[in-house]
Image (spheres, rainbow, N blue to C red):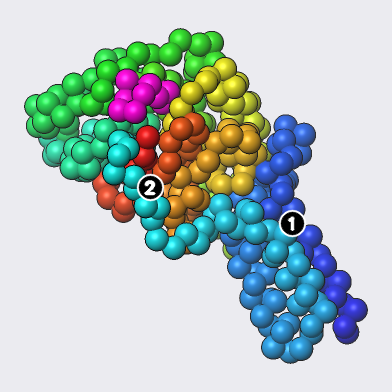
Amino acid sequence: MKHIIHLLAIVLAFVLLLSVYGGRVDPVVWTLPSMLTLAFPIVLLLVIVVMVLLAIFKQWRAAVILLGALLLSWPTIRLISPFNLGEPKADPEKTQLKVLTMNVTEFNWQKGNEPSENMRYILDQDADIVVIQEGLVYFSFENLSTVKPMLKELYKKYPYRKKEYYDVGIISKYPFTEVKSEVLSQDTLNYFIKAWDVEAPGGDLRVVNMHLSSLRFTANDSQVIESMNVPSDRKRRIKSVAQKLGNGFISHSRQAKAVRQLLDETSGDVLVMGDMNDTPGSFAYRTVCGDDLHDAWADTGFGPIYTFHAHHLYVKIDHIFYRGDMKVLSCRRDKEGESDHYPLVAVFER
């Protein structure tokens, strides 16, 4: 019996480590590790519960095997659930910069003339730089009836705005120029990368707004997940979900490499924000971060959070990364607005 328990512990430890380090495997080569990376929080919870049970029943060797796997998983655990106590101390002689990223789901234009809660939230935050995803594809969101009641306040607070929005956009208190690069051209209706050089306090700052393609989960796909408990249809459903995930991860591989290419061509201070549609530790996440970008939440946050909250999926797929002569003082997720994404707000010192 003990041999079976040890074998099961080894298998579970292997699955955990594959979910931890699966983000180092390019999904173009093998998609399974990317799928396990997405499931990492669930695998982690399972390992902790099993390890505690093994300890209760004094199966020490098997428990130690799982403990070792957990220790090897710590760098990724910290990305998903950081344990920072308190905020870094601000330097009164330096300038602070507040930024915000939010997928605004087209400011819920379907509501008619009812004012947009997303725009109201953005204006109330009074951030220095705001980047949005899913602004509007075919015309400026400033023409929407849900936004028009707040245009006067928007124009006064943010005199510098991207005039022609195409999914991703920027509104700023400071002047900016758009970066021109072949890397920044979009290739599908839900994959966009744009960048601007902002004349921000503390020196010029390149701001990159990314919106990587969706993993192709829709409202109908939530029914796919719910119906997996129907034995007669389970195999086909699982295959459908796996195929969508695999194709999405492969697309992310190419798109993340494009973002990385832009970053490799960029010097100086950089902020990369937006809807990555991928989780901490994934191949896309690791590719964009490389060896030089830092995650604002991992550096200042405490505990796990999620930013996407639809279709029975609760995952952190919106991120704020930074590098250069700047220090993050705080980062938070607000449960505000009417989007299926919650916004992230960070304060930096420069």
User: Residue drawn 62% across and 39% down?
Assistant: 286
Foreground label between 1 and 2: 2
Q: Is residue 277 magenta?
A: no
**Which quarter of the rendering shows the N terminus?**
bottom right
Spot occupied by residue 193 in the image (x, y as percentages of width and height)? 47, 23
Spot occupied by residue 224 in the image (x, y as percentages of width and height)? 54, 51
- Main SS, magenta region, reads loop
User: Residue drawn 59% across and 22% down?
Assistant: 264
The stretch of residues the image draws in magenta is 199-207
Q: Nearer the viewer, residue 224 or 210?
A: 210
The quadrant in which residue 275 appears is: top left
Determine which residue is flagged by label 1.
Answer: 17
Q: Can residue 297 be seen in this view?
A: yes
**Would you place residue 55 above or below residue 163 in this image?**
below
User: Residue drawn 65% across and 50% down?
Assistant: 37
Determine which residue is flagged by label 2.
Answer: 329
Q: Is residue 202 magenta?
A: yes
Farthest residue toward the right?
3
